[in-house]
Amino acid sequence: MDLIEGLDQCWRGIDSVVRSLRPDQLSLPTPCGDWNVRDLLAHLGGAESFFQRLPQPEPPDDWVNPYTGLDFVTGQGVAARRGWSIEEITAEIKVASTAQLDMLRSLSPDGWQGETVGPMGPTTMAELARIRTFDVFTHLLDLRAALDLPLDPTDEPLAAATAAGWVIERSGWGAVKQARLPDGSRVRLDLTGPGARRCDVVVDGNRGSVTEPSTEACENSIEGQAVAYLLLATGRTGPAEKLGLPTPRGPLAESLLANYRLFG
């Protein structure tokens, strides 16, 4: 199944990065706010161990959580692992990722539609797997960006396609809630590479959606790599520039590209 193989691609990519790490690289900054490479690795293992219901450490008694919302939970997980060695952090990644993949491989067709809880509330097992692919793949790119490694979406094609698709499908929300495009707006997405998609982002009745492309000409369009679109939508302008920034044509496309941001 593509979802399982995509996640496996992500974890194998992270394992490759970990095996090449030097001690002096652990403190390098990443595209994830104030997290360095070590913090990001702690988040990867901690988040997946949480979803796999593995025991969780407590943060230091004197630690004050400066975050809100989803960042409150992820920040707490990283703080709880600040006293861990890098060997403990990477061991947790291995245990949690193995548990995740084993659990997904054991699911029946009905099990994929079973209810669970994701980072944004109740969801299905299939949707949680998509969300986790988006998160882990994006953070794999964060690690590579921090270490000045190539950002080649074809290294993990199934993961890249799932992650980019998840971002593209939420473009209607971004068009209304963030870009505030007016009713009747239509922006053509013409995205290439893993996750390639040709579709329209439409605002109708003040609701945004992603539809099949209209047969009529569209004055507003965005062209570029699907993974670069993902990176921009998650606020990672620097890594997106390395891949080549998507090109907007028309004011509505410019507004969507400039303002659609997930979790921000």
Image: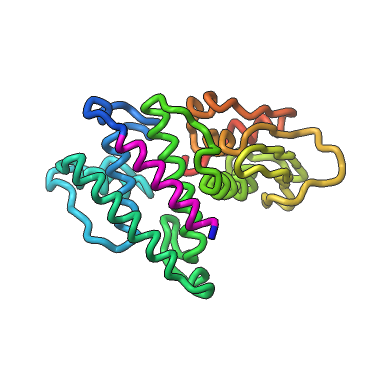
Is 178 placed left or right of 253 in the picture? left
Residue 224 vs residue 203, the one in the foreground:
224
Residue 154 vs residue 251, the one in the foreground:
154
From the image, give the main secondary structure of the stretch colored magenta.
Answer: helix
Is 243 placed left or right of 208 in the picture? left
For residue 229, what is the image quadrant? top right
Query: Magenta segment range?
Result: 2-19
Is 247 placed left or right of 186 in the picture? left
For residue 233, what is the image quadrant? top right
Residue at the farthest right position: 216
User: What is the x, y in percent for residue 198?
Assistant: 72, 43
Q: Is residue 244 above or below residue 82?
A: above
Residue 115 vs residue 24, the one in the foreground:
24
- Magenta stretch containing residue 7, yes or no? yes
**Scheme of colours in the image:** rainbow
User: What is the x, y in percent for residue 242?
Assistant: 52, 24
The residue lying at 46 percent from left, 59 percent from top is 128
User: What is the x, y in percent for residue 53?
Assistant: 29, 63
For residue 52, what is the image quadrant? bottom left
The residue lying at 60 percent from left, 26 percent from top is 245
Q: Is residue 123 above or below residue 60?
A: below
- Magenta stretch containing residue 153, yes or no? no
Residue 256 vs residue 191, the one in the foreground:
191
User: What is the x, y in percent for residue 36?
Assistant: 30, 32
Is 219 placed left or right of 134 in the picture? right
Residue at the farthest left position: 61
The residue lying at 78 percent from left, 46 percent from top is 213
